[in-house]
Amino acid sequence: MHGNLVTGILLSVTAAILWGVSGTFGQFLFQEREINVEWMITIRMTCSGLLLLVISLLRKDIEIFTVFKDRKDAFQLGLFSITGMLMVQYTYFAAIKHSNAATATVLQYVGPVLIAAFLAIKYRRWPRTSELLALTLAMTGTFLLVTHGQIGTLSISRPALLFGLASAVALAIYTLQPIPLIQKYPPTMVIGWAMLGGGLIFWFVQPPWNVSGDWDFYTYLFTSLIIVFGTLIPFTMYLYAVRLIGGQKASLLASAEPLAATLLAVYWLHTSFTLLDWIGSICIVSTVFLLSREDKVSNRGFRGRFRKLA
């Protein structure tokens, strides 16, 4: 048991760090190499979806086309592919383009608070003390992050704020929507089809052959790293971590993601991050710890079991 705990912790933290690092790679490509965000989404989702489906096929857990034999499940999968998977991918990377990986990642962590609020309304119960405190911290942190404490002014661009908050909403949808599918089918298969579907849809927005930007060694390298080390590997590692130590512990450890994104953006890309930015970020990320301490009986909400692929 002790070995499983250590392995699960290492897998969770490593996956979170890889997610954070991939966001910083995205910032470099968008801002330094002028790579189109829509093109990156098309390539990332299409390639990652295909790779995950190949893994599902090789594992032989279940026939990968089984989900399409049930019309209701097929419809839910299509809906999840667009409103969950595609939106969480696009809004996150768009927020990075208009701001930076640190700000975008931290703003997305408002998502767990939105999930807690939604579940409180859905199950008609008064929010717990931890949930109310998390909501207060999230609002305070967001205010400091986007205004630096000055009412009526924005320290980040309006598109960055809108895409960042939209990313938090998309994360909430992504986390809650596929629960019935994940419980019925292997997660790698569900996520694989959702990513492939979203990627193919984006072919109509930005086809993969319509390439722009400045392509050099680092462009090819970071694009490959985002697909493999920013999506495929950390997602697989996180799934194993959840199996070993449970979703609650894994989700708590995954809060290393915004820390990794922030540190790398500040020290590698020299992103400006003030004291108020750090305070706001700590307020937002601390909500994960508060929500993770809720009683284990209610396992409906944010437990990190269905982690984002951003």
Image: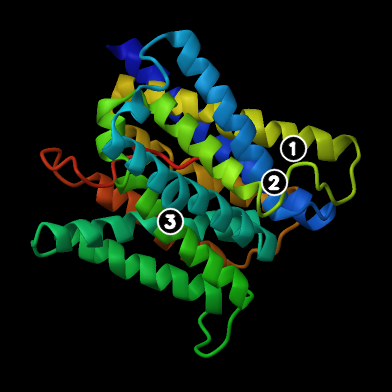
Q: Which badge, 2 or 3, comes first in the chain's sequence?
A: 2
Residue that carries the numbered disc 3 in the rendered image: 170
Residue that carries the numbered disc 2 in the rendered image: 40
Residue that carries the numbered disc 1 in the rendered image: 223
Q: Residue at coordinates 47% horizontally, 64% vertically from top-left?
A: 166
> On screen, 18 above or below 79?
above
Query: Residue 120's x, y, as percent?
Result: 16, 60
The residue carrying pointer 2 sits among few (fewer than 14), some (14 to 19) or many (20 or more) residues within 10 Å by Cα, namely many
Q: Residue at coordinates 42% horizontally, 49% vertically from top-left?
A: 84
Label 1, label 2: how far apart the Cα atoms are = 8 Å
Label 3, label 1: how far apart the Cα atoms are = 23 Å
Comparing 306 with 129, the one in front is: 306
* Residue 206 visible in rendering: yes
**Image quadrant containing the N terminus:** top left
Q: Residue at coordinates 41% horizontally, 43% vertically from top-left?
A: 78
Answer with the quarter of the image where residue 44 lies: top right
Q: Residue at coordinates 42% horizontally, 20% vertically from top-left?
A: 64
Comparing 286 with 101, the one in front is: 101
